[in-house]
Image: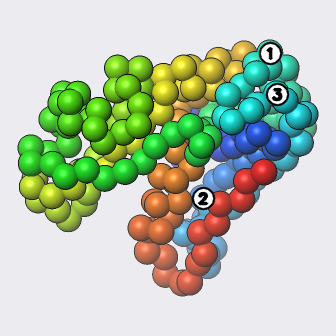
Amino acid sequence: MPLLPIPYAIDIGERSLKVLLLTQRAWWDPPHRMPRVLARAEETIPTGWIAEGIIREPQLLAAFLRRAIARLGPWWLRSPFAILTLPEARTFLTTIPTTHGATNVLGDAQHLAGAIPMDPADSVIVTQELPGTTNSTRTIVAAAPRTLVASYAKVCTDAGITPMVFDLESAAIARAVAWTPLRPFAPMAIGA
């Protein structure tokens, strides 16, 4: 049994808001490796509230998110935590050659400045050495503008939710592809 409530999975797009609450299946349930949807909500966001990944109406969007979560179901399904995807149009994911390992990439601003199309000083950057490689190969770099992350965090906190993780849509898809299931599957990005 988890120590914390299961966080919501939230995808805020320009035209839609999707909220999922997932749980693991029991070990005796045959597809026990696949999560089970406990609750799901999808709402159409009014035009103009978000444009090119930039939240234009944060107070309205926070109230909209609060109402969508209230419609998820009974109170015992509610969670104070969330995992969010950041808009793909405003984020960046790449791999870069490294010689000193992922821990030194963040300290090398000049190396990062040439690898990402944004100022490293104004960005939230996460790096991870590619699995199964040596220190002289490649490192994954995920970056998002600091103001973008702050605006999505503010919408969540204004809606009464604590964001635990911000994820890039492209990184989530990459993880799904890297995961090796016991049976065939198809990763999909469904956005609107």
Q: How far across and down, in percent of the image, does residue 85 sit? A: 60, 42
Could you tell which of marks 1 and 2 lies nearer the N-terminus? Answer: 2
Q: Residues within 10 Å of mark 2 (few under 14, many from 20)?
A: some
The disc at residue 137 is: none
Q: Image point 29% across, 32% down: which residue?
A: 113
The Cα atoms of the two marked residues, 3 and 1, are separated by 10 Å
Q: Image point 62% across, 31% down: which residue?
A: 81
Q: Nearer the viewer, residue 8 or 86?
A: 86
The disc at residue 49 is: 3
Q: How far across and down, in percent of the image, does residue 95 sit? A: 31, 53
Q: Are marks 1 and 2 in contact (CB under 8 Å)?
A: no
In the displayed structure, 22 sits above or below 31; it is: above
- Snapshot quadrant of residue 84: top right
Number of callouts: 3
Instruction: Report the amino acid beneath label 1.
Output: Gln
- Residue located beneath label 2 in the image: 24
Q: Image point 67% across, 28% down: which residue?
A: 54
Q: Nearer the viewer, residue 41 or 28?
A: 41
Instruction: Report the amino acid beneath label 2.
Output: Gln
Q: Residues within 10 Å of mark 3 (few under 14, many from 20)?
A: some
Left or right: 153, with 92 as reference point = right
Q: Residue 76, can we see it?
A: no
Instruction: Report the amino acid beneath label 3.
Output: Trp
SS category of the residue bearing label 3:
loop
Q: Residue 116, can we see it?
A: yes
Q: How far across and down, in percent of the image, does residue 59 sit? A: 80, 15
In the displayed structure, 49 sits above or below 31; it is: above
The Cα atoms of the two marked residues, 2 and 3, are separated by 34 Å
Q: Nearer the viewer, residue 63 or 108?
A: 108
Q: Image point 78% across, 51% down: which residue?
A: 192
The Cα atoms of the two marked residues, 1 and 2, are separated by 33 Å
- Residue located beneath label 1 in the image: 59
